[in-house]
Image (cartoon, rainbow, N blue to C red):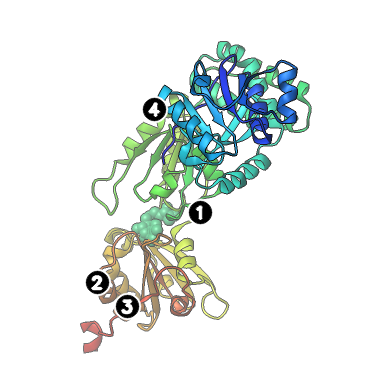
Amino acid sequence: MSLYPIFADLSGRRVLVVGAGSVGARKIEALLAAGARVVVGAPRLGEHVAARVRDGSVTHLDGEFSPDWIDGAWLVIAATRDTRVNRAVAEAAEARGVFANVVDDAALCSFQVPAVIDRGPLVVAVSTGGTAPVLARLVRERLEALLDGSVATLATLASRWRERIRARLPNLGARRRFLEEVFTGDVAALARAARPDDAEQALAAALARADDRPRGRVTLVGAGPGDAGLLTLAGLRALHEADVILHDSLVSDDVLALARRDADRIAVGKRGGGGHTPQEHIHALLLEHARAGRRVVRLKGGDPFVFGRGGEELEFLRDHDIDYAVIPGITAALACAAHAGIPLTHRDHAQSVRFVTAHCRESLDTLDWNALAQERQTLAVYMGVATLDVLRDRLLAHGRDAATPFALIENGTRHDQRVVTGTLATLVESAQAHSVRSPALLVLGEVAALADRLHWFGTPPLQAPPVLPRALRAA
Ligand code: SAH
């Protein structure tokens, strides 16, 4: 069942409650609190309802239910113990086009009453469409705990200052930023400390200081390797506050789904080479949005400063006097190693680890192969899928043992993660045999062998095929 949630204004509107026992009494109290003009229909009144009728807050219709009781009512609630009567009420309401709720009988309801967290004027309503009221209640309890009493103070303040805030900050973005600051900063702290007057003064002072043309800023955020759980809390906050998000293709949909809903999302860069948005174009976009006063998040796979061109972007922003901040992310080497069960360093096997990029032959030429071929160290090679043959040849040529273990981790941390293991001798053949594609990270070194024993995530490592490359067979 799919329900359309509404918050109804019942003040001064006639609402019929059929049944005057304890359940009816509870419903009546809630309706009176919302300002409804309550009419109760029943042959007998419970004690509580009788008192309400006596003090004039509720009108009593005496006798058995009659469909004409519904005339003029906006809503009807059936709260009798008699299923036959409840059904008659629901049917009569349906025939007259009036919404009816039958307590504890979802099938007869044309509207449901949600579980409510009331921090007036903030009201949160929770519904499971009548299918799991216990779950709704548990969710309500959690939200109750989350929304302490200070939320009501803040909501009241915001509503009292609404017009003044509007007048002072006509710019929507500026206003939103100001209110976010109010709800999370000093004003909120004073409200939590049960000092509502001080909170109001702090709000007034902040409003006097507020800037209607806020400075834009760019935050470089590391999105991590894919699994949204690996995003940092600071990164999450930046995504919640963003007006614009420029994201790489490596950033997973799960991470993007956490961003503020009405943030503009701009995809820059395509996966696996070819069709990249030129870096100058990304710079121009950063500048344009930041100068328009927006909070720009530049969201990058892994960490922005590990093979992410984050440094170039900061230099550009600095040259153009744009404020910036950087929030690190979990880089592919750390995430892939963890999710493949490979400790990058190990007292017995590796005393150091190097992050290397191998995305083209020129970049390979600049590397110090003597150093890379040393034993007892781990290489984490980024962007290396297309150049595995060069990598193997040079490492062997500089003395790395052909029996050195490797692990290739494709789509690390994602649901489709694959790990291929083997030795340097068969690296290229293994990658081909298992059609390893980008994004994949190569871990090379003694520790890589541990993946076969310590793996825990996804499917077990695929073993390399037992064929030796021709060069080695000839030797
Ligand atoms: N800034 C990123 C790296 C960008 S370079 C970071 O810190 O992780 C892109 C390379 O990162 C890919 O070619 C691949 O080698 C590696 N990579 C990124 N995400 C990956 C993932 N989920 N699984 C495997 N490798 C990944």
**Where residue 229 is drawn, which disc sits there?**
1
The residue at label 2 has a CB less than 8 Å from ligand 1: no
User: Which comes before the other along the chain, label 4 or label 3?
Assistant: 4
Q: Is residue 353 visible?
A: yes
Q: What is the CA distance from the residue labelled 2 to the residue labelled 3?
A: 22 Å
User: Which comes before the other along the chain, label 2 or label 4?
Assistant: 4
Q: Which residue is mark 2?
A: 432
User: Which comes before the other along the chain, label 2 or label 3?
Assistant: 3
Task: Identify residue type, mark 3.
Answer: Ala
Q: Nearer the viewer, mark 2 or mark 3?
A: 2
Residue displayed at 66% across by 40% down: 144
- What is the quadrant of residue 370 in the picture? bottom left
- Point out residue 151 in the picture as x, y percentages from the top left corner: 67, 31
Look at the numbered discs 1 and 2 and tell me whether their residues touch, using CB distance below 8 Å.
Answer: no
Label 2: state its secondary structure. Answer: helix
Q: Nearer the viewer, residue 247 or 43?
A: 43
Q: Nearer the viewer, mark 3 or mark 1?
A: 1
Q: What is the CA distance from the residue labelled 4 to the residue labelled 3?
A: 49 Å
Q: Which residue is mark 3?
A: 397
Q: Which residue is mark 4?
A: 288
Q: What is the CA distance from the residue labelled 1 to the residue labelled 4?
A: 31 Å
Residue displayed at 47% across by 52% down: 228
Task: Identify residue type, mark 2.
Answer: Gln
**Where residue 9 is drawn, which disc sits there?**
none
Label 4: state its secondary structure. Answer: helix
Q: What is the CA distance from the residue labelled 2 to the residue labelled 4?
A: 44 Å
Crowd class of label 4 (few under 14; some 14 to 19; many from 20; radius 10 Å) = few
Q: Nearer the viewer, mark 4 or mark 3?
A: 4
Q: What is the CA distance from the residue labelled 1 to the residue labelled 2?
A: 31 Å
User: Which comes before the other along the chain, label 1 or label 2?
Assistant: 1
